[in-house]
Amino acid sequence: MASKRPRSPENDQNQEARSADQFHNDLTPRPPRSFIIPEALDSDTTSQAPSISSSSRLSSSRASSKASKISRNSSPTKQLRNAELQQTGFARAYFEDNEQPASLELLTQRLRDIEEGYAILPRDLQNDLASERVRSWMFGDKPQFGSSDLPGVRLARKIHRLARRCFKENLAESSWNNDVHSQVLEWVMRDSPSSDDELLDYRCWCVSVPLQVSDGTRQYIIPAYRPEHAPSKMVDFCICIQPGANSPHHDAIQSLCLNRPGMSINHTDWGDLTKYPIAISIETKGPEQSYDTALLQVATWHSSQWRSLCWARNGPIDAIEFLPGIIVIKHDWYFVATDLDRFGKARTFERIPLGSTESILGIYKLSMALLTLLQWVRDQYWPAFQTDVLRLGTEVAGGETAAG
């Protein structure tokens, strides 16, 4: 009988590396491989469709069978191509090349101004940042954000130190999320002066969702909104709007949810996101994970969110022009946005740098960019959501009442 070939140390190391990679990939929560294909976005479409020949049905069945083989284990290139072909998928677009909604153009210009850095920092921070290689022209007399609006230098250095450790030690996505990204969001959403009204907060799946799901029931996108012939996706963080329990906004949401899929105001029924509208979605990636994979998750998530926003409407969405998203690859944060093209298909614009935890200056830029996005949610998205989805009048939509 032939003897077994002994395993070499190199084989053992390769096996350990593969196991580690698989563990790291599992840290971003994902729905099960199986998914439900919606019968139709409009239930009336099926009943009114003309009859087709058996050969046409067979051809359609074969095409559907091929498309349904796309899974979350398919390559990002293959999944992106499938998303481009499916009506419930999305198309890629670029801020520089494509015509975009006017409100999106205004927002991206503000983000670009921050990224360029001219006179964005208050002069009273100049001495504190003298050792950080910040150019003198980056300090101004009348910046948009004063020193009291920004994180303290001590906190910025703490975030920078933790980010350097995650990068140097090649730590997994979960470490970046817990030690770095959550620190940034915690300050912006809960500790900054602009967070006093408590209207906005963030949620994190990457900590609270179990790594292994054995019962196959955790589908984080509600079936009615999932993409056809494609795996469902989810993101790591989201920023949500929390209207007060005694507000007309809360009452309108509760009333709508009685008849909405999943009894949720969103396209997901996870936790209290059934009653708090999602405003910004954030997907993070750690070592050995690609930007395209993150884009696929955000854009698929956004296309499902658009179907939720348009659910049971007789006409088009008027006030909401786009959905903002953020992609984080280790140190670097990027802004993306998804609108609907003239055919009603999701179109994701990419990408604008928001800042980076690789430097103290990058952390200040990131803080300013996030504060700018949050102000846009308060001033633009929340009133538009009240008009389009809650159907509240302008006299009510203008109010901002935080959760009590």
Image (cartoon, rainbow, N blue to C red):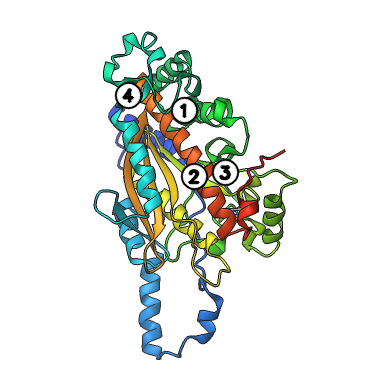
| Residue hosting label 1 | 175
- In screen coordinates, is 240 left or right of 151? right
| Quarter of the image with the C terminus in it | top right
- Find numbered disc 1 in the image and state the secondary structure of the residue it sits on: helix
Q: In this view of the protein, which residue sits in the foreground, 385 or 352? A: 385
User: Which is nearer the N-term, disc 1 or disc 4?
Assistant: 4
User: Is the Cβ of the residue at disc 2 closer than 8 Å to that at disc 3?
Assistant: no
Q: CA distance from mark 2 to mark 1?
A: 22 Å
Please name the residue that numbered disc 4 is placed on: 119
Q: Residue at x 35, y 81 (%)?
A: 59
Find the distance from the CA under tag 3 to the CA under tag 1. Answer: 23 Å
- The mark lying in front, picked from 1 and 4, is 4
Query: Is 200 placed above or below 214 here?
Result: above
Foreground pick, 399 / 27: 399
> Looking at the picture, which amino acid does disc 1 mark?
Ser
Callout 2: SS: strand
> Which of the marked residues, 3 or 1, is nearer the chain's N terminus?
1
Cα distance, mark 2 to mark 4? 27 Å
User: Which disc is residue 44 wearing?
Assistant: none
| Res 240 label | 3
Instruction: Inspect the image, locate mark 4, and give the three-letter code of the amino acid beneath it.
Output: Ala
Residue type at numbered disc 3: Cys
Q: Dot 2 corresponds to which residue?
A: 280
Q: Is residue 216 visible?
A: no
Q: Position of residue 392 (x, y in %)?
A: 64, 58
Vertical comparison of 400 with 361: above or below: below
Crowdedness near tag 4: few (<14), some (14–19) or many (≥20) residues, C-alpha within 10 Å: some
Which quarter shows the N terminus? top left
Q: Residue 111, how many percent across, how many down?
A: 36, 37
Q: Is residue 5 above or below residue 253?
A: above
